[in-house]
Image: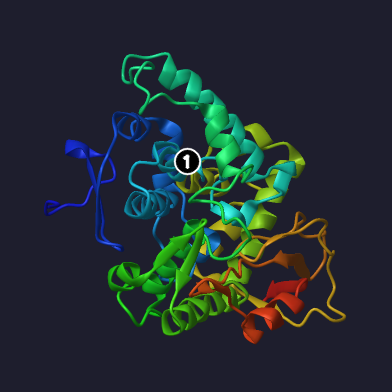
Amino acid sequence: MHGDAVDTMGIDGVWFDPLWRVEVQLTPLERRLLETWPVRRLAFIAHAGAASITTTQSYSRLEHSLGVLALVAHFAPDDHLARATALLHDVGHLPFSHSLEGLGGLEHHGLGRRAIRSLAAEVDGDDGVDPLDALDAFDGEAVIALDEGAEPSVLTPRAGGLKLDHLDSFLRSGQAHGRTTTPPHELLRRLRLVDGTVDADADDALELADLAVREALAQRSAANLVPVTVLRDLVARLLGDGALSSGELTGMTDDTLWGRLLTEPATAADAELLRRRPQAWRMVPSAGAPGRAAAGGAAAGGAAAGGAVAGAAALRHVVRRSYLDLPTIDGRPMRDERVADLGRALPIDVVVERAG
């Protein structure tokens, strides 16, 4: 059993996930990966991004990644490639996760591929893991292929549907916001995994759909979109005037980015205000509002690239995507009109201005 303190370092070779209550006996490779900076860095990046400033969703990307590892270990304990991929699937994220996606032309999938290749060279080149051990050899290209869904796996549904990555996101977020009704570890015991898709009975599937819908609504709320929009504008200012490079941004954590925003003259005052009084900004109807429409787009937790125009009254971005995966019900596709409506509402033009 786990001890009194649940650590994220793999002490004693064990990870106990407190959400799922799954105890994972870590492989030598997993223990070695937990010692590397690309993985440790995730402990300092909020899974909820800028919403961690204004909501109770403050857990890290590392906690989520370890949660996905626990789910893979639960459903497919001997799939060592999928286990390593679960642990590494988010290593490409920028600080504040999806909130800054697209700024400076950066996106976490491409950055993740680069980080995984670098990690493969690092791990295979040291004495922490025996490359001749078939269970623990680290094949970076195989991890990338599995993560990108090049072939079906326990992490990649064969025909769409709710995958383990999003199952952890919906339940972990739901727990943080008090949305869950069934304790996650009890729900897990009743779920099945069929060709990479979470499968449930009708009642449990409806509960999972409710969590997906409420997650999408939370990501479209002012509590999320106001800090996302303001934070993106602050970072865009530094990228635009050369005070911050794209290369620097990729290696930062939430705290190191805050340090830069709070000390650069172009952003210091507004960064301090965002931390102390985020309600100084508000979300307003987009029709007719001044400002500049952003180019590109992002998931609901993020935003399209762009920032404030000098002298403009508003900041704008466009939400183009939400994660709305649904489980299957006893092997059959699930339909939920709420999910369809949320999909039809995209894209969403978001406008934020000073509250006055």
Which of 59 and 249 lies nearest the eye of the viewer? 59
What is the basis of the colouring in this image?
A: rainbow
In the displayed structure, would residue 169 be above or below residue 40?
Answer: below
Which of 4 and 171 lies nearest the eye of the viewer? 171
Badge 1 density bin: few <14, some 14–19, many ≥20, Cα 10 Å: many
Residue 41: x, y in percent?
43, 39
Which of 186 and 118 lies nearest the eye of the viewer? 186
- Residue position marked by numbered label 1 in the rendering: 85
In this image, 346 relative to 73: left or right?
A: right
Q: Residue at x 56, y 74 (%)?
A: 332
Q: Is residue 57 visible?
A: no
The quarter of the picture where residue 233 lies is bottom right
Q: Secondary structure at mark 1?
A: helix
Identify which amino acid the numbered label 1 is placed on: Thr
Residue 279: x, y in percent?
56, 75
Residue farthest to the right, as pictured = 288
Q: Residue at x 60, y 55 (%)?
A: 158
In this image, 112 relative to 66: left or right?
A: right
Q: Is residue 138 visible?
A: yes
In this image, 11 relative to 8: left or right?
A: left
Q: Residue at x 62, y 70 (%)?
A: 226
Residue 342: x, y in percent?
68, 79
In this image, 72 relative to 140: left or right?
A: left
In the displayed structure, would residue 75 be above or below residue 91?
Answer: below
Residue 155: x, y in percent?
50, 51
